[in-house]
Image (cartoon, rainbow, N blue to C red):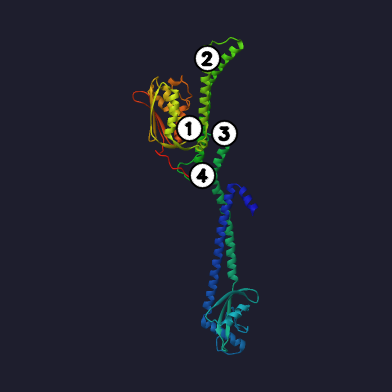
Amino acid sequence: MNRLAARFRTLPIRARLSMLVAAAVAFAVAAVSVTCWFIVQGKLYDQLQSDLEKQLHGPVAAQLLSGALSDCFDTPQGANHLRIDYGQAVTTDGTVCLLPGSTDVIRIGQSDEDIIKSGNTDTLYFRNGTDKSGNAVRVMTQVFPAQNGSYVGLVTGVPLKSTQDTLKDLALILLLVSGVGVLGAGAAGLAVARAGLRPVDELTQAVEHVARTEDLSIRIPVEDASDDEIARLSRSFNSMTSSLASSRELQQQLIADAGHELRTPLTSLRTNIELLTRSEETGRPIPAADRKALLASVKAQVTELASLIGDLQELSRSEGQRGERVQIVALEDTVEAALRRARLRGPELTITADVQPWFVRAEPSALERAIVNILDNAVKFSPEGGTIEVTLDRGVLTVRDHGPGIAEDELPHVFDRFWRSPSARALPGSGLGLSIVARTVQQAGGDVTLTRASGGGTVATVRLPGAPTAPPETP
């Protein structure tokens, strides 16, 4: 059984569906055929029994019995003898008296004798039996009281040959119809399986094509009105390939942009290092001021590279890695920490803050980095001696600077990776800061916007869902 089950599981789905359909239809047809055969058998037997009862109603049966006993025991009863194919009188001691006209004798069994001895004259007893020649007979037994106080049974019957022939013909017909039905069901099941699994075949071919060629542009045609499991699977596959294609394009764009951004500081860094190395190799020292400027440039470029690599690592982290570190964060504490760093980077600026308590669910380090990036932009574009206003009220963080602001046509691009406005390309930075901000805020369930401030400057607004009080700790 286990081997058959294992072998069945190795068959193609189409073959398994066809076999299951054929088996189900075979079971149903077999059940219906067997039920039909037994019903017809019962009806035919009921008809035979009804004919016997009508033919041998009370007075007729008594007359037959009287004639049989008269012939057997020479006890004149004065009854006219009626004729019947199978008929005999059986006494309680087992004596059998054949009725006139009977073609053969019905075999009497112990059950018949027990019925006669019981003396139950109100019931007709039916059974299948045989005559002395072995022919099948439908037997009816009636019990009558005898003159000596005992009982006598009238055992009559009709041949079953025609009924059995009818049942055999019916069984053969049902068998042929069942066979044709099973074969037709198997063929229909195979056709249905082929039609139903055609989208699966197309999906399989598409997956094999993607695995073989890595071509993510392939799509499976799906009817708009269809909403069955296969259609949903096809739509899910198309959505998956679209997402993968988009992810690949973003990855390729990220690599290309990262390579472009890395090229400039690396080229400058290599040039400065070559100058320092040539000075050492030739023994011609660089003037102290120039050497100091070169070293400062090298340090700045290394810092810029480290910042760019850190930003790239942040963007490359998976969602699962972020989800493991999410916890309840006091947003006001994170803002205060970011403000301390911003004041160190812009000591000549005036940074005012009005921070109210607010608790959010986020990754602490990523959230602080995002706020630091917003403040860094404000510090970077603020004029010397300028003012930056920071407020946090009921989960809405606003950072307002008084710099040159952002042009209207540049606002849609400020959160794109590696995008930098033409006026900021000479300033240090990788163009990833605001992209990291947008991603971190969205992962925390919030949103971030940059708008032009009235009177000049830019307003960065971050909205994060949360509560003014920390939720109770779960045990």
In the rendered image, residue 26, in percent from the top left (x then y), is placed at 57, 57
Looking at the image, is mark 2 or mark 4 nearer the viewer?
2
Residue at disc 4, secondary structure: helix
Counting residues from the N terminus, which is met first, the one under dot 4 or under dot 1? 4
Distance from Cα at disc 2 to Cα at disc 1: 35 Å
Return the mark for residue 292. Answer: 2
Mark 3 — residue?
A: 214
Residue at disc 2, secondary structure: helix
Asked if marks 3 and 2 touch (Cβ < 8 Å), the reply is no
In the rendered image, residue 25, in percent from the top left (x then y), is placed at 56, 56
Amino acid identity at mark 2: Lys
Q: Is residue 432 left or right of residue 181?
A: left
| Residue lying furthest top | 284
Looking at the image, is mark 3 or mark 2 nearer the viewer?
2
Residue toward you, 221 or 65 = 221
Mark 1 — residue?
A: 366
Looking at the image, is mark 3 or mark 1 nearer the viewer?
1
Asked if marks 2 and 4 touch (Cβ < 8 Å), the reply is no
Amino acid identity at mark 1: Ala
Looking at the image, is mark 2 or mark 1 nearer the viewer?
2
Amino acid identity at mark 4: Ile
Amino acid identity at mark 3: Glu
Q: Vertically, is 369 above or below 228?
A: above
Distance from Cα at disc 3 to Cα at disc 4: 23 Å
Counting residues from the N terminus, which is met first, the one under dot 3 or under dot 1? 3
Asked if marks 3 and 4 touch (Cβ < 8 Å), the reply is no
Mark 4 — residue?
A: 230
Q: Residue at x 59, y 35 (%)?
A: 212
Distance from Cα at disc 3 to Cα at disc 2: 52 Å
